[in-house]
Amino acid sequence: MKPIDSNTMPAQAVDQSSWLDRIARKTVLSVFERFDRSPILLRLPEGREILFGKESQDTETAILNIHSKSFFRRILINGEIGFGEAYMEGDWSTPELTHVIAALIDNLEHIPQMSGSHAKALAFHLLGTLNKFAHWTRRNTRNNSRRNISEHYDLSNEFYSLWLDETLTYSSAWFMGDENLKTAQENKYQRLCEKMQLKPGMEVLEIGCGWGGFSIFAARNFGVKMTAITISEAQFEKASARVLEEGLKDSVTVLLSDYRDIEGQFDAIASIEMLEAVGHQYLKDYFAKCHHLLKPAGRVGLQVIVCPDSRYDAMRKSVDWIKKHIFPGGQLPSIKALIDSVNATGDLYLQHLESFGMHYAKTLNIWRDQFNEKRDAVMDLGFDETFFRKWNYYLAYCEAAFASRNINVSQLILSRPNNTDFVLEG
């Protein structure tokens, strides 16, 4: 759609830029000119305003204030990653981050190199090959898995305690109404336990236990014996301490272990938003291990963030800002990728699937509000302004993605054929 240009400054102001700045600016603006959906207003460094996209009564116009010419260079050189890095470095700002990201998502098919886009690249992403190689070196081998997880989850237990709820749950909640976040997180735990039909005395493995919230809840409320594993040292220390504080040392065993090293037989296996860290090439290994560990009448309960099947190949072959700065080695699976991996490694099959992406948008909105309220406390832990902006961008990025239905979160239940001990209806 043809942009609406409000030129409030003389044209000469633009011409003072270097040749690289002019090329970068022209190339980036040419992409914005393709926008034909949600509108976005660019306020350029010299004061000029340009409106791109299609205005409507149903869509609020996103506002992007560009403060530096380096904004265009970063995007020219590093595409969508450069856009996020430009925000981290203060090259642009906005009254509401989610509006900007939602507008980009809505115009996804016109943005070269944005994760999931099929748009033909122009001069974008000159560092694309280097980013892909760097991501490949972080694939989730045993050693890399510990390193990748540590970079995100070992920032400090104090950091996460500032803005998560009291259960220290770092996954989507389930909202029944206007309840607080703690109750909504317990709703999620309750639903997954009920779907898995947990009963007193069952032996249950949780792969990727975080700070112990689910294992503590399941042991206390369903009487099961939990084995909870993590490869984050900070999470292991905190989860172990919480188990003792809750008086559950005889019901919950916390191990610092990779799932590939676990042996034994379990009545049920639970994993909440851990599969995103497995990576495409290890999905079959993951489900083969679940098949090996599960008793004949057992069941697997998963909660996992998923991308559309139609975009999975494009997303797994690209490296976006989230993969570089938040979850190195990570990859959102699609439902088809999950089921294909399940079918290739044993006789487990899908018995139930339920999606609730809008609940994640609300969860992330609450997290971001609480994170921003604790700005001073975050800084007191030794983090700087760039880190603070990075996490704001991350939380807003994810909130907008769920709110736009660009990605989803689902609970899946798997079991074996002819398992008459486990019948899940509805």
Image: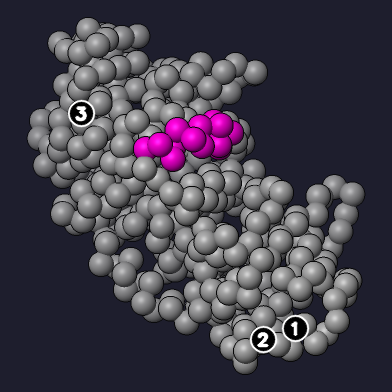
Q: Position of residue 298 (x, y in %)?
A: 25, 27
Q: Residue at x 15, y 11 (%)?
A: 250
Disc 2 target residue:
17
Disc 3 on helix, strand or loop? helix
The reply to whether callout 2 and callout 1 are in contact (CB within 8 Å) is yes
Disc 1 on helix, strand or loop? helix
Residue type beneath disc 1: Val
Q: Position of residue 384 (x, y in %)?
A: 43, 49
Residue 342 visible, this orientation: no
Q: Does residue 214 appear to the left or right of 173 in the view shown?
A: left
Residue 64 visible, this orientation: yes
- Mark 1 or 3 closer to N-term? 1
Q: Residue at x 85, y 76 (%)?
A: 9
Marks 2, 3: nearer the viewer = 2
Disc 3 target residue:
237
Disc 2 on helix, strand or loop? loop
The reply to whether callout 1 and callout 3 are in contact (CB within 8 Å) is no
Q: Residue at x 21, y 19 (%)?
A: 241
Coloring applied to the structure = one colour
Is 317 or 413 nearer to us in this picture? 317
Specify the label residue 14 is tagged with: 1
Is 251 or 312 nearer to us in this picture? 251
Residue type beneath disc 3: Glu
Q: Residues within 10 Å of mark 3 (few under 14, many from 20)?
A: some
Q: Does residue 398 appear to the left or right of 155 in the view shown?
A: right
Which span is picked out in magenta? 367-381
* Alpha carbon separation for disc pair 1 and 3: 55 Å
Say whether residue 384 is magenta: no
Q: Residue at x 30, y 28 (%)?
A: 211
Residue type beneath disc 2: Ser
Q: Residues within 10 Å of mark 2 (few under 14, many from 20)?
A: few
